[in-house]
Image: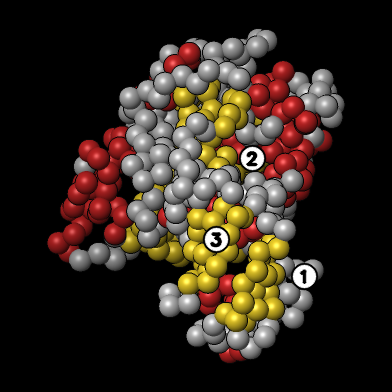
Amino acid sequence: MTRLPSVPAFHRRCSCCGSHTDQDASLFTAEPQSRVMWMSRYSRRVVVALRKSFSGPAQCVRGGPPQLSLSPLLSLSPLQRRGQNTLSSATLSLLSSLSPLSSPLQRRGQHTLDSASLSEPGCSARYVGALHAERLLQVEWEDGGHSLFPFTWLRDNCPCPTCTLQSAQARKLLMGDLDVNIGLDSVQLQSDSKVSLVWQDQHRSMFHCDWLKKRCFSAAARRSVQEELFLNERVHWGSSLCIPTADFEEVLEDDRAALAWLLALRRIGVVLLQGAPPEPGQVAQLAQRVGYLRLTFYGHTFKVQDKPQANNVAYTADKCSFHTDYPALDYPPGIQFLHCISQAARGGENLLVDGFHIAERLRVEDPEAFHSLCSLSVDFTDIGTDYCDFRLQAKHRVIDVNAEGRVTRLNLNNATRDSVLDLPLQKVQSFYRSLKVLEAMMNSEDNIVTHRMEPGDILTFDNWRLLHARTAFVSFLERPRHLEGCYLNWDEVMSRLRILRHKLQGEEA
């Protein structure tokens, strides 16, 4: 087994469970041999070392060090037996530049199960018992850990055919029929892998131990399951990022390549697919690999060209400032694809900024501006005719955070920010000051990645996270700049990611 490097100083470990927080741009500027990324492997914490051994030609899409690729954290040994040599070096690099290793941070006998493999198949229990006064089921696991499960939750989630529609894994038990004060009549451990419960009304429930262990109520276990379900951890980056690449045809044809692409898209926020035919229709084909296109007022797909009487600033040859697309919708698209069919004679470079990284910097460097942009709602509007007539209006905070304070989305588009500003008079100046601070951070050279797309490139990126811009360009009639774009929702992307992960890794649904 590969010896694990020590954790660099820029990683912060949680005192509760030993897990590590989201990483920032320092991960990408450290020497390659010292780069270490700590993240969840869906159901258990693992340590993955980003090695210096980039085999084959460097796949960097811009100048500088070899490309940083992101592994889907697959166990490659069984997968490589299926067409081991059929993938290109670019996609194999995406698959294997990170290797999953088991975390050594295991402590036994912890109620919190902070180190347990929460979805390891076939886990065993050594003891089960009822704590009737507390209305809790106690389970002691073979590894020495133990968990507590509320009676009401167990009865609510009884998996028997009377209570659960097996074909849909959906609850049939109605809330009106749930006795929230029900007690247990008996508890029995069967063959160390199943727990049999008989309730006071003589209803029987049978639970598999691995199912229970994954749903442990400790803080660390809940965090692990949430990470498995939603992949919320992100790798933050700045100007030293080399955009991860993958092969277009392999993403369409090979599930491993598709999973690697979607995981990199989730973790890093941007992946460049190369080798697509330089003709319209490719983004629709790629979207269908995932799910289906997001229809907007600009159509299922849209052409980004210098158009006379343009109905969008993107449809000109002018410079576009950093923005997210479509904040004039209540639910902006989560993913954007841009396919280069033909490039301009001069200019037209794409500029990318990690909005989550910028927001976290703003939180630290100017808390007042961060609070302002997280709390004040801004009006956005879009009016015109394309796929059909439209007159859109929406309100968003520039920086959205969830209940835990995690940044979840940026909503910023200077072109469609409305002149209507629904703010108290005394807050207008502070809002503009905060917006200018954010703008300055976005335009700082140490945060910007620049890439000039070539025909056949498809830039896929997280529209809730990345702010993208474009330099002005010059096109000629015989060689116009022509991109085709489309949108998807994160719901469909995450669904496909979970399906591929389940198919390739056999993880419990």
Per the image, label 1 sits on a secondary structure element best described as loop
Q: Is residue 20 visible?
A: yes
Residue type at mark 2? Leu
User: Of label 3 and label 2, which has the lower sequence position?
Assistant: 3
Task: Say above or below: 466 vs 33.
Answer: below
372 vs 135, left or right, is: left
- Asked if labels 1 and 2 touch by Cβ distance under 8 angstroms, the answer is no
Q: Nearer the viewer, mark 2 or mark 1?
A: 1
Task: Say above or below: 416 vs 466.
Answer: below
Q: Residue at x 33, y 24 (%)?
A: 9
Q: Nearer the viewer, mark 3 or mark 2?
A: 3
What residue is pinned by disc 2?
262
Q: Residues within 10 Å of mark 2 (few under 14, many from 20)?
A: many
Per the image, label 3 sits on a secondary structure element best described as strand
Q: Nearer the viewer, mark 1 or mark 3?
A: 3
Residue type at mark 1? Gln
What residue is pinned by disc 3?
139
Q: Quadrant of the N terminus?
A: top right
Q: Residue at x 77, y 38 (%)?
A: 255
Q: Is residue 164 visible?
A: no
Per the image, label 2 sits on a secondary structure element best described as helix
Q: CA distance from mark 3 to mark 2?
A: 37 Å
What residue is pinned by disc 1?
166
Residue type at mark 3? Val
Q: How far from the left and from the top, in percent, is residue 507? A: 70, 48
Q: CA distance from mark 1 to mark 3?
A: 25 Å
Q: CA distance from mark 2 to mark 1?
A: 29 Å
What label sits on residue 348 in the rendered view? none
- Asked if labels 2 and 3 touch by Cβ distance under 8 angstroms, the answer is no
The quadrant holding residue 401 is: bottom left
